[in-house]
Image (spheres, rainbow, N blue to C red):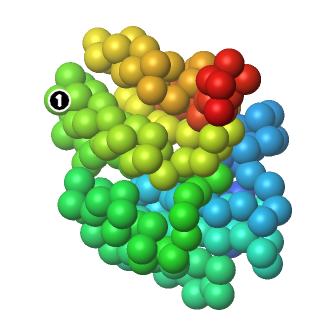
Amino acid sequence: MAYKPRDHYAKRAKEEKYPARSVYKLKEADQKYHLLRSGQKVLDLGASPGSWSKYALEKVGKKGLVVGIDLNPVKINHPRFLFLKGDIFELSPEEILREANVEYFDVVLSDMAPKTTGDRSGDHFRSIALAERALFLAERLLKPGGVFFVKVFEGEAFPNFVEEVKNRIGPVKRFRPKSTRASSREIFVLTHKKVKDTKNRGD
Ligand SMILES: C[S@@+](CC[C@H](N)C(=O)[O-])C[C@H]1O[C@@H](n2cnc3c(N)ncnc32)[C@H](O)[C@@H]1O
């Protein structure tokens, strides 16, 4: 039988006890860009079935916190994990902070995706809407210097989205993991929230 990379990642996820092969996308980005560190507070948007949250929990350790949000359940029972079941468009930044009992997050991850319909343009625009919502939340919830890492299905609105991320958060890197299926148009956008220059403000 021909070798299929996707089978390799799915098999590996099963062996390593992650609920989804998507964990290797985050892991590859983390190995390259050092997104996750001990003690961080991480918000994981689109967390179900839970492989990113599980990986993030391993990285943030005993003093960290991972908050996952999704329409669908996540089966992780861990003292440093909080799951909020719901629609990201209906949860306000203030509610998220209140539920998590924190003042900010160090990292906002989003692997959110719409249910794909086969209509590439429609799927692209639904993905952009989710990424825009993630951007809105990241802008309000990240501390200066914090990391925003978000998935988008590429298409005509992608360049505009990248511009918005640049203007509202900080300089952008585009990342396409090796484990992304060849047929997929997904791409990840990575940025760090600008730390305001206070030198010339006179305060
Ligand atoms: C590719 S999966 C995430 C996989 C996850 N990162 C993991 O590693 O286990 C995309 C998720 O986005 C979620 N999602 C889509 N629209 C959403 C919305 N409006 N609010 C919350 N979650 C949403 C879906 O329910 C789905 O579980």
The total of numbered circles placed on residues is 1
Answer few, some or many: residues within 10 Å of disc 1's Cα (few below 14, many 20 plus, some between 14 and 19). Answer: some
Q: Is residue 155 left or right of residue 192?
A: left
| Residue situated in front as seen by the camera: 23 or 100 | 100
Q: Is residue 177 above or below residue 82?
A: above
Q: Which residue is mark 1?
A: 122
Q: Is residue 164 left or right of residue 178?
A: left
Q: Is residue 203 above or below residue 98?
A: above
Kind of residue sitting beneath label 1: Gly
| Residue situated in front as seen by the camera: 54 or 42 | 42
Judge whether residue 136 can be spotted in this image.
Answer: yes
| x then y, percent, for residue 198 | 67, 28
Judge whether residue 21 can be spotted in this image.
Answer: no
Q: Is residue 34 left or right of residue 182?
A: right
| x then y, percent, for residue 78 | 63, 85
Q: Is mark 1 within 8 Å of ligand 1?
A: no
| Residue situated in front as seen by the camera: 113 or 19 | 113
Residue drawn where x is 65% and y is 25% of the image: 202
| x then y, percent, for residue 9 | 65, 49
Q: Is residue 114 above or below residue 195?
A: below
Residue drawn where x is 73% and y is 23% of the image: 199
Residue drawn where x is 56% and y is 39% of the image: 149
Q: Secondary structure at mark 1?
A: helix
Residue drawn where x is 19% and y is 40% of the image: 117
| x then y, percent, for residue 203 | 65, 33
Extreme-front residue of the structure = 202
The N terminus sits in image quarter: top right
